[in-house]
Structure formats: structure tokens, C-alpha cells
């Protein structure tokens, strides 16, 4: 496993982190399997974990707290998220800041998360949604400054809404944001246009989330893949999105270099960009942990393949099924 600086936090984080959403209750989750996969990831050098209160009402925060307690000699970094008080994903400009992230709400959830993580100070606390019309709200500034001053958090981050990588640029310039989390993968390359250059200029850490496009870039899905009702992916991979996704995935399979799997190419594509600090695949299973962590050791892709992958960029805008 290789390590990179998480921007100005100066945390040395593993290139492959662990995204815990799936462990909080996606179909097929098994807590013991999740626990042993996390331990395997830790043993193989993973030291960065992304969780959120919304993942099972503190469930994945709790699993991570357990793992941190069981590995006292290792410096594991926890990034969690405060949910929006109005329970709306994604944030829209029509929502008032104070209805989404009032100081009272943020401190309440920061405290709940601290307890589940079993820490006094959270390494990175993120807002789970964001709308840039809020960037100059005095309560945003005073809340983040107080969280840091009182030692409840070490650093603050924003989770940028799906397929809106520019919706956060104003907030980055406030000086309050140390880390951003954004969707970046072979399909969703738009963060390269404006977000990454600003992060590089301001030394803001970048967490590249959803590296496999929620699973399609794992290469195992087909036109027949269906998820049970209640599983978030049943909506995402519904009739509007599944066929055109599979068509694109099949094109990618045709350009795989000999011996390289699609998930390996997907992760190495992300890690080839110097603005990226870490990527956080959902890794509930031991085989996935082994494969995904090996992608860090394999290093960046060669220039020829990267140039080819540019052609597979897919510009998308938020849809009613995408959040
Ligand atoms: N801030 C936000 O709003 C937000 C939104 C989405 C995600 N996230 C974060 O980003 C993390 C990653 O996103 P995600 O989990 O939604 O999607 P993802 O990482 O793009 O995809 C996860 C899917 O890929 C599969 N997979 C993992 N490794 C694989 C491999 N080597 N080969 C084939 N398939 C593989 C998993 O399989 P199994 O189903 O078998 O486990 C799972 O179905 C989340 O866990 C969460 O921490 C944040």
C-alpha cells in the first residue's frame, strides 16, 4: 500500500481507503463479514475509513469505532458526516442553511458520532450535502470554527453532491474546508475541470468516492442485474440507467490491457490523478479488499491508456433516481 498526504491535514492516508456505506445495510451485508474485511484492510495497510451517521443511523460509525479500539497501535483515520437536518439529498439552493446545518444540529450529530467512534476528536467531519449558496453564511463559519477550536474535530470536509463537482468551489475559498469528497471515476471525470485545480492550489485533500460507479465498474453486472426493493441501487440501476451503463462498461472491457481487470483499471485510473489523496471503494468482502489494495501497489496507468480512458468520460447531471 502506498500513502499520500490528505492535503493540508498532513495525515498520511492510504491510497485505497475503505468506504463503509454498504456495510450499513445494503443487501447482502453481514456484520461479521464486514468486521473481518475491515480487519483485513487494516492488516494490509489501509488506514483511512469513510463513514457517516446516515449509514444505518450510526451503524458504520460504530463498526469503525470497534475496529479502532481493537487496533490501538495503529493510527487509523476516521472521516464521518453530519446528515442534513431536513433529510433531503441532494441539497438545493431553495433550502435555507439554518434548516439544514444549524449549529445545534451539527453539534448534536458531531457528539453522537464521537461516541460511536469512541474518540474525543473526529479526524475529519464532513457535511453530507452542500449547496454553495451557503458559503458565506455566518453560522457556517462560526460552527466550523467552534468545532475546531473546541477540539471536537481536527479537520472539516464537504461531501459534494453527485454530478455537481463545481457546487462547492465558493466554500473552498472560505478557508474553512480542509478536505472534499467527490465522485470521481472513469465515467465521472468532471472534477478534473475546475474542482481539482482549486484543491491543488489551496492544498485541500481529495477523497475520490464511488470509484466503481456504485458497482458497475466492478465488471460483474449485466442487463439482467436487479436489486431488491429497498436497496438504494434498485433505483440507481433502474431502467433509465442500467442499459446505457452496461453498454459503456462493455466498451471498457474491450480496451482492458492483458492481465488487468476492470476494477483494477478503475482504481488505478483514479490514483493516476495527482490531486487525489485517497479513493474509498466499498469493500465488504475479503476478495475485494485484497484486489482493491493491490491496485495501489500496481501504481498509475500508462499515458496511452489514460488518454484512451478520457474518451469514456460520461457527463451527467443529477436525476430523480440518482440520490
Ligand atoms: N458522500 C456521499 O454522499 C456518498 C455517497 C456514496 C458513497 N459514499 C462513500 O463512498 C464509498 C464508496 O461508494 P459505494 O460503496 O457507494 O460505491 P463503489 O465503491 O463505487 O462500489 C461498491 C460496489 O463495488 C463492488 N466492489 C468492490 N470492490 C470490488 C472489486 N474488486 N471487484 C468487483 N466489485 C467490487 C461492491 O461489491 P459488494 O456489493 O459485493 O460489496 C459494491 O457493490 C461509500 O461506501 C461511502 O463511504 C459517499
Image: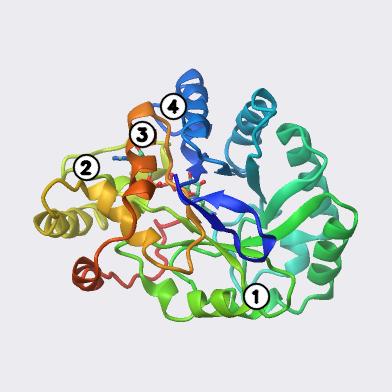
C-alpha gap between disc 2 and disc 3: 20 Å
Q: Secondary structure at mark 3?
A: helix
C-alpha gap between disc 3 and disc 4: 18 Å
Q: Nearer the viewer, residue 104 or 172?
A: 172
Determine whether the beta carbon of the residue marked 1 sits less than 8 angstroms from the nearest atom of ligand 1.
no
C-alpha gap between disc 2 and disc 1: 36 Å
Q: Is residue 171 left or right of residue 291?
A: right
In this view, the mark in front (2 or 1) = 1
| Image point (50%, 18%), residue name | 32
x%, y% of residue 117? 71, 35
- The image's mark for residue 97 is none
Q: Residue furthest right?
A: 150
- Badge 3 or badge 1: first in the primary sequence: 1
- Badge 4 or badge 2: first in the primary sequence: 4
Determine whether the beta carbon of the residue marked 4 sits less than 8 angstroms from the nearest atom of ligand 1.
yes
Find disc 1 in the rendering and name its residue: 172
In this view, the mark in front (3 or 1) = 3
- What is the crowding at mark 4: few (fewer than 14 residues within 10 Å), some, or many (at least 20)? some
Q: Is residue 229 above or below residue 100?
A: above
Find disc 2 in the rendering and name its residue: 221
- Say which quarter of the image contains residue 171: bottom right
| Image point (66%, 56%), residue name | 126
Count of numbered labels shown in the rendering = 4
- Badge 2 or badge 1: first in the primary sequence: 1
In this view, the mark in front (3 or 4) = 3
Q: Is residue 166 left or right of residue 215?
A: right
Find disc 3 in the rendering and name its residue: 290
Is there CB contact under 8 Å for labels 3 and 1?
A: no
Find disc 4 in the rendering and name its residue: 29
Quarter holding the N terminus is top left
- What is the crowding at mark 1: few (fewer than 14 residues within 10 Å), some, or many (at least 20)? many
C-alpha gap between disc 1 and disc 4: 35 Å
Amino acid at each position: 500500500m502506498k500513502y499520500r498526504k490528505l492535503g493540508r491535514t498532513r495525515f498520511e492516508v492510504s491510497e485505497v481507503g475503505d468506504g463503509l456505506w454498504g456495510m450499513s445495510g445494503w443487501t447482502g451485508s453481514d456484520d461479521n463479514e464486514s468486521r473481518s474485511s475491515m480487519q483485513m484492510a487494516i492488516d494490509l495497510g489501509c488506514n483511512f475509513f469513510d463513514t457517516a451517521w446516515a449509514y444505518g443511523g450510526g451503524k458504520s460509525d460504530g463498526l469503525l469505532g470497534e475496529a479502532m479500539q481493537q487496533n490501538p497501535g495503529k493510527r487509523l483515520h476516521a472521516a464521518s458526516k453530519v446528515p442534513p437536518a431536513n433529510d433531503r439529498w441532494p441539497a438545493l439552493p431553495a433550502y435555507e442553511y439554518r434548516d439544514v446545518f444549524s449549529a445545534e444540529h451539527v453539534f448534536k450529530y458531531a457528539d453522537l458520532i464521537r461516541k460511536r467512534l469512541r474518540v474525543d476528536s473526529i479526524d475529519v467531519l464532513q457535511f453530507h450535502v452542500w449547496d454553495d449558496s451557503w458559503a458565506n453564511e455566518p453560522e457556517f463559519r462560526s460552527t466550523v470554527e467552534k468545532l475546531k477550536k473546541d477540539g471536537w474535530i481536527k479537520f472539516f470536509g464537504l461531501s459534494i453532491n453527485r454530478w455537481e463537482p463545481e457546487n462547492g468551489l465558493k466554500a473552498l475559498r472560505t478557508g474553512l474546508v480542509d478536505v472534499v469528497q467527490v465522485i470521481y471515476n472513469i465515467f465521472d471525470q468532471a472534477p478534473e475541470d475546475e474542482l481539482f485545480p482549486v484543491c491543488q492550489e489551496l492544498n485541500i485533500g481529495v477523497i475520490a468516492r464511488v470509484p466503481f460507479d456504485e458497482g458497475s465498474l466492478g465488471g460483474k453486472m449485466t442487463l439482467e442485474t436487479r436489486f431488491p426493493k429497498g436497496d438504494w441501487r434498485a433505483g440507481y440501476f433502474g431502467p433509465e440507467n442500467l442499459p446505457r451503463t452496461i453498454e459503456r462498461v462493455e466498451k471498457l472491457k474491450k480496451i482492458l490491457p492483458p492481465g488487468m481487470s476492470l476494477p483494477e483499471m478503475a482504481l488505478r485510473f483514479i490514483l493516476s490523478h495527482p490531486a487525489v489523496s485517497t479513493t474509498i471503494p466499498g469493500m465488504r468482502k475479503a476478495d475485494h479488499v485484497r484486489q482493491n489494495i493491490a491496485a495501489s501497489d500496481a501504481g498509475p496507468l500508462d499515458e496511452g491508456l489514460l488518454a484512451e480512458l478520457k474518451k469514456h468520460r460520461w457527463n451527467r447531471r443529477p436525476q430523480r433516481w440518482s440520490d
